[in-house]
Amino acid sequence: MRKLILVLLFLYPLLTFAQREFSGGLVLGPVASQISGDGLGGWDKFGLCAGGWVRMPISESTGIQMSLVYINKGSRTVDTLARTTFGYHLDYIEVPILLDYISPFLHKKLHGQVGPTVGINIRQRIIANGQSFDPNPAFEMLDIGIMGGIAYDVTAKYQIALRTSTSFIPTRPSPSVPVPNSFYLKGNYNQTLQFLLLMRF
């Protein structure tokens, strides 16, 4: 509960300012994820992203879109011969803050989006062959990253978006650093692919 309160306090000044003129609604969609540096590889962990969003216009073609979402992240691998499974299952409350640019092309229905995202870890588990364990070392509480994507206004009420994100700061230290100067070998980084449906109120 304290983690959720921290996110709400983070959003409060932005939402208060945006009340003067904004649009908003709900967001829902599937997520494919992996953890760079965990040795598993591949976008084999599937989950969900769900929550709400608001958009505050800056000009006719630009605005700030903020979301408060619950999102599943992690990674997973399956050995079909040995019939074993192993995966990191991470749940976050996340706040993307995206610069939203409306392109003049395609009847001004195409958007480009980029910006920072901050996630608070609310649960972390290793699930191996149906058994649950605590990760060691544990993942950090904060996941600070960057997100980018495109969106398309299907109708005045519905929008679809394709987004990708990656941690900018390691979410978990690496037990050993084989190449000290390598950015991606210093620890684990969450990476996601998100296909979202946004509904406007």
Image (spheres, rainbow, N blue to C red):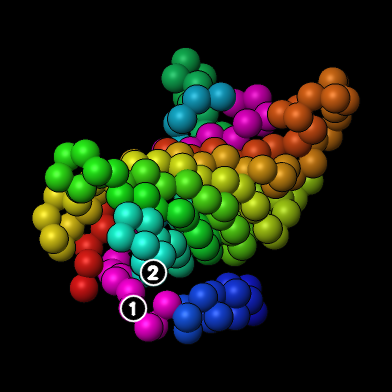
**Residue most extreme to the top:** 81
Residue at 39% over, 69% down? 56
| Image x and y of residue 180, in percent | 88, 25
Q: Amino acid at mark 1?
A: Glu
- Tags 2 and 1 in contact by the CB under 8 Å rule? yes
Please provide percent x and percent y for residue 84.
Answer: 52, 28
Residue 96 at x, y = what percent? 50, 58
Residue range of the region highlighted in magenta in the rendering:
18-40
Task: Give left or right: position of 60 versus 94.
Answer: left
- Distance from disc 2 to disc 1, alpha carbons, whole Å, reads 6 Å
Q: Which residue is the site of mark 1?
A: 21
Residue that mark 2 sits on: 56
How many marks do you count on the picture? 2
* On-image quarter of the C terminus: bottom left
Q: Residues within 10 Å of mark 1 (few under 14, many from 20)?
A: few
- Judging depth in this view, the residue of 96 and 99 nearest the camera is 99
- Which residue occupies 59% across, 26% down? 40
Name the residue located 20 percent from the left edge and 48 percent from the top edge.
Answer: 109
The quarter in which the N terminus is drawn is bottom right
Q: Secondary structure at mark 1?
A: loop
Residue plotted at (37% across, 83% down)? 20
Towards the viewer: 136 or 184: 184
In the image, residue 15 above or below residue 159: below
Residue 120 falls in image quadrant? bottom right
Q: Locate residue 152 relative to residue 183 in the image: left or right.
A: left
